[in-house]
Amino acid sequence: MEEKKLVVPGEKLGVIEEVYPGDSTYTSDGLIRALRIGKAVYKKEEREMTVVPTKINLIPIEGDVVIGQIEAVQSNSMTMSIDYINGERSRKRFSGVILIPREQGQRGRQRKTHCKVGDIVRASVISTTNAMIQMTIQGSEYGVIHAECSICGGKAVMVASKLNCPACGNIEERTLAEDYGVQINS
Ligand SMILES: [Zn+2]
């Protein structure tokens, strides 16, 4: 068995010409998709794609994918409220800290603006030691998924890895997730 990444309901796992649909999957239009949140596991011998459902956590744990809103930005970290844990809405008002990736060979240069207060961000939980939730946004799937223009408050779109405001033309720097602009279900 080969462990794969965390998948969310509806996520494409393969095509029926190549693999069989297994537990916690469904097929539509020739595609195998995840029925539940969990780890996608490919059983090589059976050529079967399955999803091993994730237990719904009461608290975020290491390896969880979380979505929330930036509440504060410090020099080495950012504080984020956690609204979704592995795609499930959490109303427990957890809050954690995103460690800002260390920059190499950029001494003296202005620090990159990774996120601003109010941004909606997808992050990965890397530690919960001493009940402190620590997260990272390193990795192409992590970073800002929704932001508003800091000049006019308009909804910003991604153009060439930067935030672009169609309303006022403002361009801003952020660490954007590759699927920036994705809709999240509430
Ligand atoms: Zn604007």
Image (tube, helix red, strand yellow):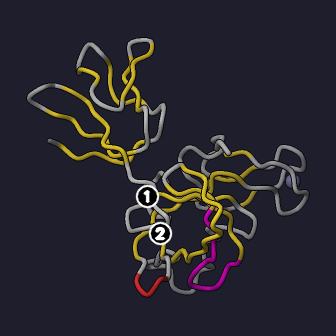
Quarter of the figure with the C terminus = top right
Q: Position of residue 6 (x, y in %)?
A: 38, 48
* Residue 136 image label: 2
Q: Which residue is mark 1?
A: 139
Q: Which residues are magenta?
A: 72-82
- Eyeballing the image, is 161 above or below 61? above
Are the residues at dot 1 and dot 2 in contact (C-beta closer than 8 Å)? Answer: yes
Quarter of the figure with the N terminus = top left
Question: Residue at coordinates 75% horizontally, 49% vertically from top-left?
Answer: 164
Question: Residue at coordinates 47% horizontally, 67% vertically from top-left?
Answer: 60
- Eyeballing the image, is 116 above or below 77? above
Question: In the rendered structure, does residue 73 fall within the stretch colored magenta?
Answer: yes
**Can you tell which quarter of the image residue 170 is in?**
bottom right
Question: Residue at coordinates 58% horizontally, 56% vertically from top-left?
Answer: 84
Q: Nearer the viewer, residue 90 or 39?
A: 90
Helix, strand or loop at label 2? It is strand
Judged left or right of residue 126, residue 184 is right
Alpha carbon of mark 1 to alpha carbon of mark 2: how far?
9 Å
* Residue 177 image label: none
**Residue type, numbered disc 1:** Gly
**Can you tell which quarter of the image residue 56 is in?**
bottom left
Q: Nearer the viewer, residue 101 or 159?
A: 101
